[in-house]
Amino acid sequence: TKLKTTYADILPKLINPATGRIHTTLNQAVTTTGRLSSSDPNLQNIPIRSEVGREIRKAFIASPGNVLVSADYSQIELRILAHISQDEELLRAFEVGEDIHTRTATAIFGVSPHEVTAEMRRQAKTVNFAVIYGQTDYGLSRELNIPASVARRYIEEYFEQYPGVRKYIVNTLQSARAKGYVETLMGRRRYLPELNSANRVYREFAERAAVNMPIQGTAADIIKLAMIAVYDRLRAGGYRAKMVLQVHDELLFDVPEEEVSAVVNTVISAMENAYPLDVHLKVECKVGKDWCSVLPISADENEEVHRDIQDG
């Protein structure tokens, strides 16, 4: 399989004889949105949902006496969408801690929150992300295995529920056609000359990129700010914990067991306050001996962490 040839066969050969570790390269200037990419080997691409992927992740272990801590932004792109679009419903849903996929399910299926099934929520989640990625009703129908007419209705219901998002898309495309580029909240630009192309395929690709880049690019900018903030705070606190990997919305740390509680506090605080948005950024931490078996720190512990942070 691809995973076997890409990882299982190759990784042992890439161990650095001096450090006994595998060192990936994180590239700053490869992606069009500003996300970091990883190469030689690509450690951002190991699937968590397949059995083989999980086996490969098991091979990545903490140093002796340490554990791995994974800190992950929860739904960062949807939170950025709420901030950029200023859609009142989205802002309110995040404000009160509502489950955003359940919220969308109530709109597209016309049911109350307690009637939303796991399957409805799964489909609503796909719709939430389809809108960010500028997916067509045809694309959504293929992904959800439903007729295009039903997919079209889902998208229409979505925009009924979140009119600010439709406004964001219309305004972004208008501005991008006029200026020739879109930008993140921090001013990273992506130029899109294809927006005015006579070729429909090129034009539609550029339209999807124009809608998505400010969101995905802002998420990339925020996690880079967070990486700097976390690094500075860990150093200032004299911790021995080390940041070892970034996988888009997730940071991975190698942490001495006695430092876990303090480091989790520090990391969550730095990441959640990396950039001021109208929606609170939320970070979830998991801890484990290897990269596959990291488990969420219990709700109580996480609540305590959040309380500690809010109490300052």
Image: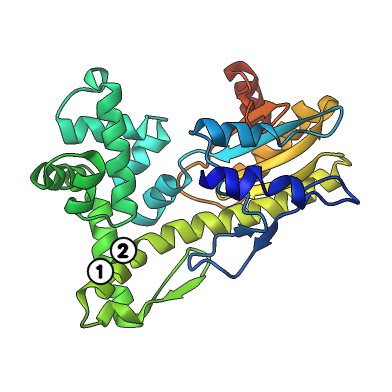
Residue 89 shows in this picture? no
Q: Residue at x 85, y 47 (%)?
A: 236
* Residue 301, placed above or below residue 48: above
Q: Dot 2 surroundings within 10 Å: few (below 14), some, or many (20 or more)?
A: some
Q: Secondary structure at mark 2?
A: helix
Which residue, as the protein is rendered here, is positioned at the far left?
149
98, 260: nearer the viewer: 260
Give x and y (percent) for residue 227: 68, 52
Circles 1 and 2, Cβ within 8 Å, touching? The answer is: yes
Front one among 49 and 234: 49
Label at residue 208: 2
**Amino acid tagged 2:** Arg
Percent position of residue 218, x then y: 50, 59
Name the residue: 46% across, 44% down: 279
Q: Amino acid at mark 1?
A: Glu
Please provide percent x and percent y for residue 189. 48, 73
Spatial CA span between label 1 and label 2: 6 Å
